Every structure is written in C-alpha cells, then in structure tokens.
C-alpha cells in the first residue's frame, strides 16, 4: 500500500510540474550601457512554438497602457527547451541615443534564435522602472498576459521619494521605493538595493511558469524569481536552465569538454559525447557572448564532437568554449571549457611588416622576440604555409631577418610568417604580404610629364617631388664631379644660378638614372 501511495505521489508531482511548464515565459532581462538591452524568452515545453501570436509590451514609468512604451509582435519559431532573443534594434547613434552594440545584436544570428526590436518607442528601450509583459493574442488589443516583469501602473521611487532620476524595484519591502535618504550606490549594512535598474536579471531555475496576474502595488519582489547580475552581462543570453521536465527527450551529455593548458603554437582539442547520435555546434565567447564557430582560421571540427583549435597564440589565452548538441527538437549545452596558453616566457616583441619592392631588388622581413628564441620563416605561395630553407631566393630562413633576393613578379602577393620558439613553446607572427612591381623608368616619367623644368635653365630648376617621390638631388659635371647636392625640405625649386654655363647630369635620390640638364 505504501509503495502504491509513493507511486501516485510521484506521478502527481510530475503532472504538476508539467502543468506549470506549458507556456512561454521571460528567462532573462539585460539592461546595459546606453541601448544595450535585450529580453530572452524560454520555451519550457517539449514542442516548438510559433511566435506569431505573441507580443512583448512595455508600460513605461507607471503607465497603465503600453501604447507610449512600445508594442512588438514576435515572429519566428522558438524550439522546445530553447530561447528566443528580442534585442534593441537601434543601429545608428543619434545625439541623444547611442546605437546598440553590434556584438549584442549579432547574438540573434548565431544560432538563428531571435529578432531585432523596432524603432523607439519599443519594449527594449526599457529602464529599471518599466513593467514588461509577454502576452498572447491575435491582435495587440486582444491579448492575455502570460508573464510580467514588474508591476503595471506602478513606478518605483528613488531614495529622494521621487520618480526622477528613475529608480527600480528593490529586494526588500516595500519593493517599489527606497528609504528616503538611503544611498542606493552603497549597500552598507543593508542588502537593500535597486534590483532591476542597470542590471541583468536571470530567471531562477525553479521558475516553471510566468506571472499571469499583475501584482498588487508594493508586492513585486524581483528577488523571489530573479537573480540580479551586473549591467552588461550578456554571456548567458541564448541558453537557460530550467527545472521543467523534458520527458520526450532522452538526449544527455555523457562526457563534458575539459579545460586545456596548451603550449603556444600547439593544437588544443575539446571533446564532448552524448548518449545518442547527435548534431554538434561548437561556440566560443571572446567577450561578446557565445557565437557559433565555423571551419575557418584556427578552427576545425566545429560541427563534430571534437573541436580543434590550431596554431594557438597568446591571444587564445582564457578563451572559453562550449558545445550545443541536438537531436530533433531536443537540445543540450555542454559545460564551458577554458583554454589556457603556456608561453614559457616567450613573447614576440615586433611583428614583421608588409613590404613593397621592385623586380630585381631584395625584400627583408624582420621579427624580434625574447632573447635566445629560435626562428623559422614560412611562406604561402598559394598552397598553404610551408617552411623555408636557405636556398634559391631565400636567406636568413632561420634568423630573425628573412631576405627574399632577386625578386620577380611571381613573388607578388606572396605571404610570409615566422614561427618563433623558446623552451619547447612556439608562437606565430602575423602573416604579411610582399608586393612586387616593375621598376619605374624615371627618365621617361620626367620627359612625358614634364616633371623637371625648364631645360635649358637659367636660375631656378623646378622639380615635381610629389610624383618623383624623392627629396634629394645631385648634379654632376661631365667629368663626374658633384657640383650640387641638396635635400629639399620645403618648396620645389633648386637654385642653379651660380653654376657655369654647360651640360650637367642630374641624379634623383637613389636612382641610377641621370637626366641631362643644360645651364644657360
């Protein structure tokens, strides 16, 4: 009899949880700097839900109507046990209103799980004293509340007992006002503080259903259902943990990815496994929330159970990864794993720079690094990077200065980089490009464009330095003696009035070509 009773109680418990987990509710509220604002909605059911009849409305500053605060009709589909993001849609900055950060707006693209809100006024222009509702209905005027953040018709008061500057709901009675004279920026011996103003709110895991009835005044306690985090905390957007049962999904993660400590220059691998055949999507967070990875640059295996991060550099240190696994309508998210990069004291102090040179000349690439480091230059001529040796055009292949000699047009757009090693650790420089062009025929350029004039000359010789790209000249007599040498810093004329009449040879900069000048 006792065993039967326990079975009945367990069944009733499951049915009660299922009855609660039957509709959408808000799972996250982000109020960041400027217009960096977002709302996250969670689907606790075992089926996808079409959002066309769902509405988000803002009741600003204690209003009882959402008309002035903004009304947005949602669109798209929210998958079972998944989230949907509504992000502030302001894309340009005005004198009084900054744009929403592009990185925050991009969270709706990866994966495709959200939409940008409309122009002002719109729900995601909320402040900590606005009530936000999620409603269901065929039109905006024929809707039913399925969740509320705040209290419609109530505007919290600040410590001055005023509504300006705006305040937020607190976590102690009377919830909608601060004690007069209380400094909200210093908690002191109290835990009383603004819980909703300039904060990120995350719904507690235990919440399984939204608030469908507007709270009475001074009764909305945000801490009963929400955890309050610092402003601009975006890292949790796109995933929500909830205690609602997922009876239709047998998917579970068997082995979680583990954090890695890897030498610079090596490859790190993160692996995850599940109890069924699944789809995988690896993501990373470099400070703007988790984004999907693609098989490019350092990454491979992004849609398999094993992610490879290749040719690790110091820039990868503290980078965080996780994997979304899915099967049909079921999905789960792995634990986060952190990549720590061991550099062994190795650092690249000066990166090589792009070089431009002409056919027949020599180009040099230079890198500097920690003392006693070893160097190995590589090139990519269109087939991936390959290590160089001191042969053919190349010298200094294992030194900090690489020389590429006797350049030809085939070297044009060739890429180079250097692998730097020390005590078993390696790091890789930026990739740089060599541009090779055909030498300019200086004399032909001068004659065709009349860049040096007049010729013959009496007193002043005018030179167009901007096109000849030189600021130094030398003049020789016919015996090869230098009769004039100048570095031109201002103006474009050279005084030759003191030279005797005759024929002279003019040399520009480092060019070996000479122009004949007649002095009257």
Image (cartoon, rainbow, N blue to C red):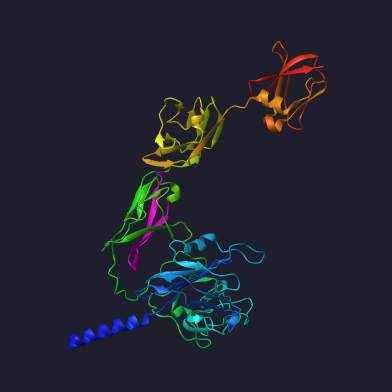
Residue 22 x/y as whole percent: 37, 80
- Note whether residue 132 is visible: yes
Of 367 and 492, nearer the camera is 492
Residue 159 x/y as whole percent: 60, 79
- Above or below, 76 relative to 411: below
Q: Which residues are magenta?
A: 317-344
Residue 464 x/y as whole percent: 73, 30
The mark tally for this picture is 0
Q: Which secondary structure type mostly characterizes the magenta part of the structure? A: strand
- Above or below, 342 relative to 166: above
101 vs 79, left or right, is right
Q: Residue at x 48, y 83 (%)?
A: 145
* Occupied quadrant, residue 12: bottom left
Query: The C terminus lies in which quarter of the figure?
Result: top right
Of 142 and 162, nearer the camera is 142
Q: Residue at x 50, y 24 (%)?
A: 406
């Amino acid at each position: 009899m006792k065993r039967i009773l326990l079975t009945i109680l367990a069944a009733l418990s499951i049915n009660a949880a299922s009855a609660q987990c039957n509709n959408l509710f808000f799972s996250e509220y982000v109020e960041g700097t400027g217009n960096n604002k977002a709302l996250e909605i969670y689907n606790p059911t075992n089926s996808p839900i079409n959002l066309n009849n769902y509405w988000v409305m803002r009741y600003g500053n204690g209003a009882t109507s959402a008309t002035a605060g903004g009304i947005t009709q949602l669109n798209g589909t929210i998958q079972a046990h998944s989230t949907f993001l509504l992000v502030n849609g302001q894309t340009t900055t005005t004198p009084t209103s900054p744009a929403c950060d592009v990185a925050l707006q991009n969270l709706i693209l990866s994966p495709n799980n959200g939409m940008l809100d409309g122009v002002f006024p719109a729900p995601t222009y909320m402040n900590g004293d606005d009530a936000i509702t999620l409603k269901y209905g065929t039109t905006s005027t024929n809707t039913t509340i399925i969740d509320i953040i705040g209290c419609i018709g109530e505007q919290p008061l600040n410590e001055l007992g005023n509504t300006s500057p705006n305040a937020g709901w607190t976590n102690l009675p009377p919830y909608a006002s601060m004690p007069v004279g209380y400094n909200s920026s210093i908690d002191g011996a109290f835990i009383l503080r603004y819980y909703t103003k300039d904060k990120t709110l995350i719904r507690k895991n235990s919440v399984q259903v939204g608030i469908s009835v507007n709270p009475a005044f001074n009764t909305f306690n945000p801490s009963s259902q929400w955890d309050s985090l610092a402003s601009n905390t975006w890292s949790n957007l796109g995933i929500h943990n909830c205690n609602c049962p997922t009876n239709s999904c047998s998917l579970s993660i068997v082995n979680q990815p583990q954090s890695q400590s890897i030498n610079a220059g090596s490859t790190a691998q993160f692996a995850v496994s599940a109890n069924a055949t699944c789809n995988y999507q690896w993501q990373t967070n470099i400070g703007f929330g988790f984004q999907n990875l693609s098989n490019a640059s350092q990454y491979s295996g992004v849609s398999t159970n094993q992610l490879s991060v290749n040719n690790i550099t110091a820039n990868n240190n503290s980078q965080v990864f996780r994997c979304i696994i899915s099967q049909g309508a079921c999905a789960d998210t792995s634990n986060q794993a952190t990549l720590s990069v061991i550099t062994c004291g190795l650092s690249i102090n000066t990166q090589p720079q792009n070089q431009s040179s002409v056919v027949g000349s020599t180009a040099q690439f230079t890198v500097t690094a920690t003392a006693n480091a070893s160097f190995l230059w590589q090139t990519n001529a269109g087939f991936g990077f390959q290590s160089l040796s001191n042969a053919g055009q190349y010298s200094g292949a294992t030194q900090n200065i690489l020389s590429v000699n006797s350049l030809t047009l085939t070297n044009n757009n060739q890429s180079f980089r250097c692998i730097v090693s020390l005590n078993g650790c390696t790091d890789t420089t930026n990739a740089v490009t060599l541009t090779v062009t055909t030498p300019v025929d200086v004399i032909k350029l001068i004659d065709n464009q009349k860049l040096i004039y007049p010729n013959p000359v009496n007193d002043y010789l005018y030179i167009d330095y901007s096109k000849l790209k030189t600021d130094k000249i030398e003049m020789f007599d016919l015996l090869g003696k230098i009769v004039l040498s100048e570095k031109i810093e201002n103006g474009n004329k050279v005084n030759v009035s003191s030279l005797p009449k005759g024929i002279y040879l003019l040399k520009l900069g480092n060019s070996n070509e000479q122009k004949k000048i007649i002095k009257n």
